Image (cartoon, rainbow, N blue to C red):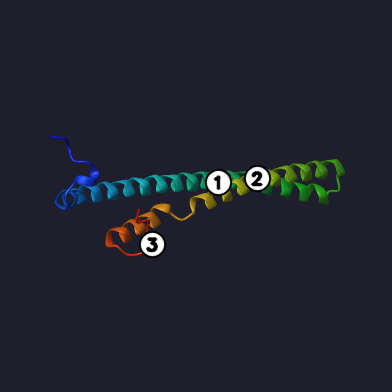
């Protein structure tokens, strides 16, 4: 005798398969949440590293700005002009690092898609809410 197709299965067979289906669904949702959290942690880590790099370069900026002030007060034109140019370059590097870090923080703070998916799945199991009844 051939195995019953999906359309020929009895209600008892379908009810018997329900715990396995729900268990698989929950396991898949948990795996998706783990993957999304890993993605967020990665981007927060990158952003934090870039902020630390920008802070490290900012220490050199402070040193060059102090040197610029000292040299400007002594009115040695070539010395303070060179220090001012170096300060400008360091400031540009800091701005670029902070910009990239902010992008990574923004990517890491997007809402979890899995939470909404889990809510839809629970609504479907309960028979409430909007879901595709196909």
Whether residue 85 sits left or right of residue 21 in the image: it is right
Front residue of 111 and 3: 3
Neighbourhood count class around disc 2 (C-alpha, 10 Å): few under 14, some 14–19, many 20 upward: some
Residue 63 showing in the rendered view = no
Q: State the residue at coordinates (26%, 46%).
A: 24
Whether residue 108 sits left or right of residue 89 in the image: it is left
Mark with earlier residue (2, 1): 1
Q: Secondary structure at mark 1?
A: helix
Front residue of 70 and 104: 104
Whether residue 73 sits left or right of residue 12 in the image: it is right
Q: Secondary structure at mark 2?
A: helix
Mark with earlier residue (1, 3): 1
In whole angstroms, how far apart are the C-alphas of marks 1 and 3? 46 Å
Neighbourhood count class around disc 1 (C-alpha, 10 Å): few under 14, some 14–19, many 20 upward: some
Mark 2 or 1: in front is 2
* Residue at numbered disc 1: 52
Q: State the residue at coordinates (41%, 45%).
A: 38
* Residue at numbered disc 3: 130
Picture coordinates of residue 81, whole percent (x, y): 82, 44
């Amino acid at each position: 005798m051939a195995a019953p197709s999906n359309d020929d299965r009895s209600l008892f067979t379908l009810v018997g398969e329900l715990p396995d289906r729900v268990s698989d669904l929950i396991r898949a949702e948990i795996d998706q949440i783990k993957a999304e959290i890993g993605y967020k942690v990665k981007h927060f880590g990158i952003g934090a590293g870039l902020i630390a790099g920008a802070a490290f370069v900012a220490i050199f900026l402070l040193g060059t700005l102090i040197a610029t002030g000292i040299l400007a007060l002594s009115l040695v034109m070539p010395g303070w002009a060179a220090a001012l140019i170096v300060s400008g370059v360091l400031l540009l590097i800091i701005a670029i690092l902070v910009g990239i870090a902010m992008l990574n923080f923004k990517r890491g703070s997007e809402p979890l898609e899995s939470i909404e998916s889990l809510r839809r799945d629970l609504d479907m199991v309960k028979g409430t809410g909007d879901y595709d009844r196909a």
